Image: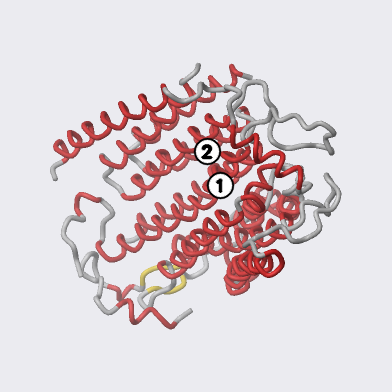
Amino acid sequence: MTVVIAVMLALVAVVGTVIVFTDDPGRQAVTLSLFGLCLGVLFLALGAPDVSLSQITVGAAVVPLIVLLTIRKTRSMR
Amino acid sequence: MSIYAYVVAGWLLVMGSLGIVRSRNLVHAVVCLGIAQSATYVLLLGVGYQRGAKPPVYGSAPAHPSLHVMDPVVQAMTLTDIVVSATVTALLLALAIQIRKRRGTIDPDELTAIEG
Amino acid sequence: MSRPLRLVVFAAGAGGTAALFLLAVLDMPPFGSRFHPYRNHSVPAALAHATANVVSSVNFDQRGMDTLAEESILFASVVVVATLLRKTDDEEWRKERRGRVLDSTLLMGWILLPYTLLLGFDVVAHGHLTPGGGFQGGVVLGTGIHLLYVAGRYDMLRRVRPIRPFEWGEAIGTGAFACLGVAGVLATGAFLANVVPHGTFGTLLSAGTVPILNGAVGVEVASGVVVLVSAFLDQAIGLETAPAGGGKGGRAGNGRDAEGGGNR
């Protein structure tokens, strides 16, 4: 279990950094979904199934969706 | 391993803030704020972790309940914050849409002057 | 402030924060230790109120006041988003373009819809027994309804998803939480006291007010997510600026706030 936590922590740090240095928000939204999923797995490994459930539904689905819709709106306006 | 999880939390906070500072797009800045915010989740759950303990959910009525579970208090704080922060993120993105409508740009560097 | 200067200022601030953070962390109980004073108090308190999921007990029983505050933030955010993204006078509904959707995608959407709604109800209803509760189940429910959009029918979604009831649900959920708090005051003198009989540990009817508050939050969060996502969907897909709107930048009229007020 400790190995899973160590790996997921590293993955979260790397994916988070990649998102910050991705300048195109459109591509960010996809990575953000992956980041949310990684956090969800990390929280499960840390023994927090409640938080994991919350993180996966919100972080991997709702927030990236809203970000994508915002990008679509801001790009479609002339 | 003893402070590794905390260092990752600190790293996410600094990286997220850096992303906000060098952002050229308000949507990008909001996403980076989300990264910085997730630092608090990692820190809180890291604090509440105990090696070898179980999640704080009891299956059946324990006669002599074992206290050795993960700290439920930090988990409860994190769990509500994740959902609430999503709505605050939505609020910031709605503001970005409004700024785009009114000012024609969402590049923070072009949004210098205050407009009535 | 110029960009290079801004980065220098940030580097100084981030360096200071990192140094202080590291100092604090080095003095904390190490990761994975057995030192958890909060847990030692909250677990017996949860078991005393027959709540199997201690996290739910902390959220809705021991620290219910805190959750009410969190809920109010959620409520306020949703109200502000709905206000900011409402249809203004210079916007109009886009002509429906019937895009082609893969049959398999359509089928998936329709199969997943009832399953997701059922899952959402289940997560809310068993929040005091298993991992889950009003917050998570509410998000699942609110997202599940939008599978109709994945199934490709935005026009249909707009028809079967009247926003008004969800705006009401949002308010009722928040209000119910506060009313239960007041009920606690009337019965025992403590706000949000667990006044309902605690029931048998591990059964659906246990934990007293926890499942009721879970339900209230579930209604609120589900309604909130529906209102939020649909406001963004309307902006991104449904609405477009009327052709007469003019060019960029300058068209932001000063009187728009007053004009847009009455059309919802």
Label 1 CA crowd tier, 10 Å (few <14, some 14–19, many 20+): many
Q: Position of residue C86 (x, y in %)?
A: 44, 71
Colour convention of the picture: secondary structure
As helix, strand or loop, the secondary structure at mark 1 comes to: helix
Q: Which image quadrant is residue C35 in?
A: top right
Question: Tag 1, which chain?
Answer: A
State the count of labels: 2
Q: Residue furthest front?
A: C189
Task: Verify CB contact (< 8 Å) between mark 1 and mark 2.
Answer: yes
Taking depth in this image into account, of B70 and C247 the one nearest to the observer is: B70
At x 44% / y 35%, what residue is drawn? B39
Question: Tag 2, which chain?
Answer: A
Q: Amino acid under label 1? A: Val
* Direction from residue C164 to residue C118 in the image, left or right: right
At x 30% / y 32%, what residue is drawn? C17
Residue C250 versus residue A28 in the image, above or below? below
* Direction from residue C35 to residue B13 in the image, left or right: left
Q: What residue sits right under mark 2 in the picture? A: A36
At x 81% / y 31%, what residue is drawn? B64
Q: What residue sits right under mark 1 in the picture? A: A58
Which quadrant does the N terminus of chain C fall into? Answer: top left
Q: Amino acid under label 2? A: Gly
Label 2 CA crowd tier, 10 Å (few <14, some 14–19, many 20+): many
